[in-house]
Amino acid sequence: MKIQVFRSAIEDLAAARRFYGRQAPGVGDYFFDSLFAEIDSLALYAGIHSVHFGFYRLLAKRFPYAVYYKITGDTAIVYRVLDCRRDPNRIRKELLK
């Protein structure tokens, strides 16, 4: 399966990378690499995740983030990468923009 990452997801990743980068040296890069490994796993595992707010939701293993994606044909399209510690209503609003 192919993977397409929308600009909104890249922006989410960049903002989180900056946040974690301010916490300690190297943590931002570790976050970015970890989340991209999760996104890359969609090539094999897209479609097995539960559906929330109309999107499949892949929960990251090492950070409290979720990857929201949809499947169109043979492509997994990543729309957003959001912090799970936020209010669910705010997450819903972010996804429905």
Image (cartoon, grey):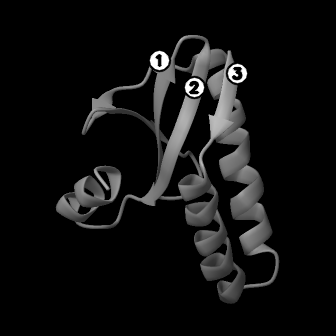
Q: Decide: marks 2, 3 in contact (CB < 8 A)? A: yes
Q: Position of residue 47 (x, y in %)?
A: 47, 17
Q: Nearer the viewer, mark 1 or mark 3?
A: 3
Work out how far the residue at label 2 is from the one at label 1, CA to CA, in angstroms: 8 Å
Q: Residue at 32% across / 56% down in the picture?
A: 97
Q: Quadrant of the N terminus?
A: top right
> Where does label 1 land, which residue?
47
Q: Decide: marks 2, 1 in contact (CB < 8 A)? A: yes
Q: Secondary structure at mark 2?
A: strand
Q: Indicate which disc, 2 or 3, sits on the residue closer to the N terminus.
A: 3
Q: Position of residue 86 (x, y in %)?
A: 31, 67
Work out how far the residue at label 1 is from the one at label 3, CA to CA, in angstroms: 13 Å
Crowding near pointer 1: few (<14 within 10 Å), some, many (20+)?
some
Amino acid type of the residue tagged 1 in the rendering: Gly
Q: Residue at 74% across / 73% down in the picture?
A: 27
Q: Secondary structure at mark 3?
A: strand
Q: Indicate which disc, 2 or 1, sits on the residue closer to the N terminus.
A: 1
> Where does label 2 land, which residue?
76
Amino acid type of the residue tagged 3 in the rendering: Lys
Q: Is residue 9 left or right of residue 26?
A: left
